[in-house]
Amino acid sequence: MEEKKEAPATSLQATGANTFHDHKGNVFYRHLQIDEVERAFNFRPPTMLECAYQTGIERANICRYVAELEKQGEIALVRKGLCPITGYRAGFYTTNKSLFPNIQQSINI
C-alpha cells in the first residue's frame, strides 16, 4: 500500500469561513474574530450563543470580546429575554449605534 504524505505544516491554517487558526497565538486571528463578532451583532440583536452558532466562534471567546467591546462603548445590551436556542433568560446585544438604548431610559428602568 502507498503511504499518505502529510502536507507541510504552516503556522497559519484556514479552519473555516474567513477565520484562521494560528498555532503561535497571533494577534491577527484575534482581530479577525473580533471583527466577525462585531458584524454578527450589527444586523439584529442576537444572544451570545446565537452569535457563536452563526460565526462558529466559541461562546467563551464571544463573552470575552463582548466585555471588551462594552468597555470601549462599541456594543450595548438592548434587552433581556428568552434565548431562542436554549429557552433560558439571556441578553440581546447590538453594535448598531442606532439600536443602542437611550441612557436616560436605562437609568429609569
Image (cartoon, rainbow, N blue to C red):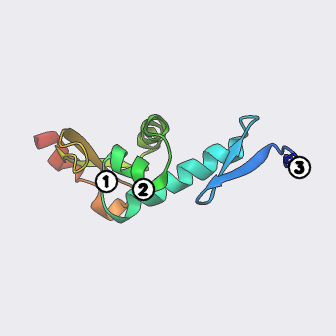
Give the residue type at disc 1. Pro
The percent coordinates of residue 53 (x first, y second) are: 40, 51
Q: Residue at x 15, y 49 (%)?
A: 105
Give the residue type at disc 2. Gln
Name the residue nearer the viewer: 56 or 82.
56
Above or below, 52 against 98 in this view is above
The percent coordinates of residue 18 (x first, y second) are: 62, 60
> Which residue carries the number 3 mark?
2
* Distance between the alpha carbons at the discs numbered 2 and 1: 10 Å
> Which residue carries the number 1 mark?
46
Give the residue type at disc 3. Glu
- Residue contact at pointers 1 and 3, CB within 8 angstroms: no
Mark 1, secondary structure of its residue: loop
Q: Is residue 81 left or right of residue 32?
A: left
Name the residue nearer the viewer: 3 or 24.
3
Among the two numbered marks 3 and 2 on one chain, the one whose residue lies closer to the N terminus: 3
> Which residue carries the number 2 mark?
54
Name the residue nearer the viewer: 29 or 71.
29
**Viewer-side label of 1, 3:** 3
Q: Residue at x 45, y 41 (%)?
A: 62
- Residue contact at pointers 2 and 1, CB within 8 angstroms: yes
Above or below, 72 against 60 in this view is below
Q: Is residue 66 left or right of residue 32?
A: left
Quarter of the figure with residue 45: bottom left
Task: Tell me the tag on residue 9.
Answer: none
* Distance between the alpha carbons at the discs numbered 3 and 2: 40 Å
Q: Residue at x 34, y 50 (%)?
A: 50
- How many other residues sit within 10 Å of disc 2, few (<14), some (14-19) or many (≥20)? few
- How many other residues sit within 10 Å of disc 1, few (<14), some (14-19) or many (≥20)? many
Among the two numbered marks 2 and 1 on one chain, the one whose residue lies closer to the N terminus: 1
